Image (tube, rainbow, N blue to C red):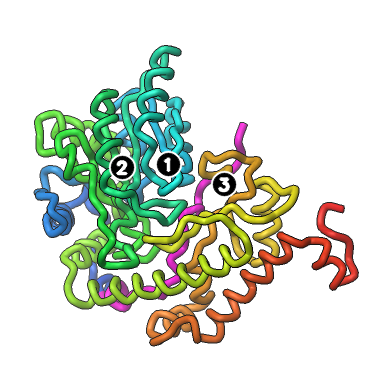
Amino acid sequence: MRRDVPYGMRPDAGLPVPPYWEASLAGAPVGADPPGGGERLLEAAGGYWARRGLESDAGHVLAAPGAEPLLLALLAATGGDLVLARPAAAWQEPVARLLGRPTHSVPTPPEGGGVPDPFALLETVRRARAAGGDPRLLVVSAADDPTGTVTAPELLHETCEAATEAGLLIVSDETFADTLHHHDTVLLSPAEMLPDHTVVLTDLGATLVPGTVPAALARFPATAHGAAWRGRTLAVLAALRAVLLAPVASAAAYVLTEPAEVTEWIAAANRLHARTAAAAYRVLTGAGATCRPPAAGFQLYPTLRAPGLGAEALEERLTALLGRPTPGGHHFGDDPNEPRVRIDTGALHGTTEAERRTALTAADPLAVPHVAAALTTLADALATLAHPSDASAETGSPAPGS
């Protein structure tokens, strides 16, 4: 039985707490919102999605304290098995395991993560059903954790067509949709292609609210079956008492209206993520790692030059070298024998509020001393992994594992 617990496995943005968040909490009401969210929060969420081309109203939206309880409620409301991309965010499969639901993983194509290869998806579903399985729900993430990539519209369209052919409902995890590094990157939602068969899920901790605050939204199809799905999901949330505290709900409702102070903060954060992720990518590939170039978020997913190490051993070794968690690919459903880890670039921004604020506001964050030092530490750690005998010779100690 697996013992790893996915709590804390989300990538850290490495940002200070936004001043608008603390100001929004001041004078907020006490208590808790009703299950699924109060009217003010749900109306703000509808406006948030409408500005992104997905018309919504409060009757088609739900809120919960994090993406995990939302997916749990969605699964409980739907029945059947879960289909995941491989690799997938570390928190998804354990949610299905809590309900005793089987999961079926489908490899992603070489050019990007988060969305299964369409032909492999059809074959996986066919085999699962032939073996007595009941795959019904496909989770995709066009802006992806762990890879930090963005799925090309053509591939997303083909996968949506395959999901339709296979009779799968789609949950589109769009947590990182607002973290694109460049304005010219095209990101589409499955809800634009299959509006009647897609639930959009987003965890606000990647952008709008501090990462330590559990707050997430789900948008349901504006159809009779979408309303029924929402109703069953709401019933599960109510049974679990999975509600937002009133101060969090009030502050989230404010930031979802996206006033100038919020959009300016997100733009500054994305500029920082783009610079530090690109720098870390150069360090990784310069050290011989194989890695998809970053396009969103604050995470990279390289296969490293690490002789004799699988994912678990590499995680342990690199965590010790860097002094911060670097989860191995086995947490994301990947081959545990591959030397693959997720590198969270938010850690480059500093460990204190002051350091993170300095990185965020710097004209050139790569010139900030503590950011430059963190990149050097990463380069040194990669060199130690690639040439452990050289490192042990310099220190006069035996190579790790010898």
Rendered image: mark on residue 17: none
| Mark 2 lies on residue | 155
Check disc 2 and report its element: helix, strand or loop: helix
Label 2 CA crowd tier, 10 Å (few <14, some 14–19, many 20+) = some
Of the numbered discs 3 and 2, the one sitting upstream in the chain is 2
> What residue type is disc 2 on?
Leu
Alpha-carbon span between mark 1 and mark 2: 9 Å
> What residue type is disc 3 on?
Gly
Check disc 1 and report its element: helix, strand or loop: loop
Alpha-carbon span between mark 3 and mark 2: 23 Å
Residue 2 in the image: state x and y as whole percent. Answer: 60, 35
Residue in the picture at 59% in, 52% down: 303
Check disc 3 and report its element: helix, strand or loop: helix
Of the numbered discs 1 and 2, the one sitting upstream in the chain is 1
Label 1 CA crowd tier, 10 Å (few <14, some 14–19, many 20+) = some
| Mark 1 lies on residue | 109
Rendered image: mark on residue 329: 3
